[in-house]
Image: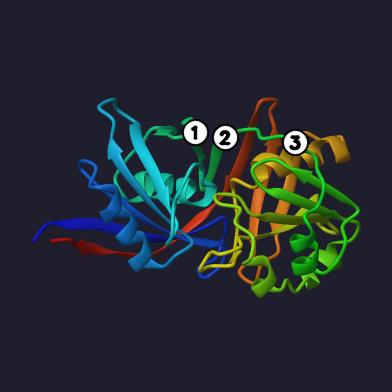
Amino acid sequence: MPHIPIYQVDAFTHELFGGNPAAVCILEAWLPTGILQKIAAENFLPETAFFIPSGRQGHYELRWFTPEIEMDLCGHATLASAHVLFNHMGWDMHQITFHTQSGPLVVSKNNDLLTLDFPSRPAVPSTLPTEILKGIGVYPMEVLKARDYILVYHDEDIVRNLQPDKAILDQINLDPGGIIVTAKGKHVDFVSRFFTPQASIFEDPVTGSAHCSLIPFWSRQLDKKEMIALQVSARTGKLYCVDAGNRVLIGGTCKTYLEGNIFVP
């Protein structure tokens, strides 16, 4: 029976059981999308990444799936994929290029720190849908929208203590986007949390792609190009951020949790 190598990696964390878990599956060629989606559903992690060689050394085609849908961009599963290539597949150069729905994405390595080079997605002022306000429960001081809604609060403790009503928010379909809540940090530059209505995993532990919008916003607010961010979910994740104009750099570390094989008929 054919088998697919699989790794489970905790991304954006220095410690096992922190950060955001991702499955990384190594393919020789693409399987049907329906099979990839079933594997992601079976894994039941925030994201499952699949990659194949692209024919050029150090270049791979990469796709990301939640348990429900294919995503256009995912940070933590890209970081996890690079971690697998650097640490388990013997890639000894300093960078890897992934070819994705969002264009070429480069991941560079500096000791244990991996850095994503992602597109910047600046948000614009927006109005807050009534259902989101009811579901979040606390009115923000500012509302913006890119792929995701961004709700800006004046205090980190508000972000940490929010208890969104999943039943209300699940009435909204934002696929593939979500709801970011954020504030200036007390011990880091800024903090955030990320919620995805109608998703089986309602609160994403650490959301690299959300920082494509958070980084340009907080860079302007703080008048800084280099920042440290904390996603204050229960698992918590630390991100090392740089506003590079039309790109953002998002750095983090990973820990391998599991190595094995999937058997697909």
Which quadrant does the C terminus fall into? bottom left
Looking at the image, is mark 3 or mark 1 earlier in the sequence?
1
Q: Nearer the viewer, residue 94 or 225?
A: 225
Residue located 79% across and 39% down the image: 217
Q: In screen coordinates, is 34 left or right of 80?
A: left
Residue 10 percent coordinates (x, y): 48, 61
Residue located 72% across and 51% down the image: 229
Q: On the image, numbered disc 2 is attached to which residue?
A: 118
Q: Secondary structure at mark 3?
A: helix
Instruction: Determine contact: label 2, label 3, CB under 8 Å.
Output: no
Inter-mark Cα distance, 2 to 1: 9 Å
Inter-mark Cα distance, 3 to 1: 18 Å
Q: In screen coordinates, is 166 left or right of 56?
A: right
Can you tell which of label 2 and label 1 is closer to the viewer?
Answer: 1
Please tell me in which quadrant of the rendered image residue 22 appears: bottom left
Q: On the image, numbered disc 3 is attached to which residue?
A: 216
In the figure, 221 relative to 112: above or below?
above
Please tell me in which quadrant of the rendered image residue 185 appears: bottom right
Residue located 74% across and 38% down the image: 123
Residue 103 percent coordinates (x, y): 47, 29
Tell me if mark 1 has few (under 14), some (14-19) or many (20+) residues whose alpha carbon lies within 10 angstroms of its own.
few
Q: Secondary structure at mark 2?
A: strand
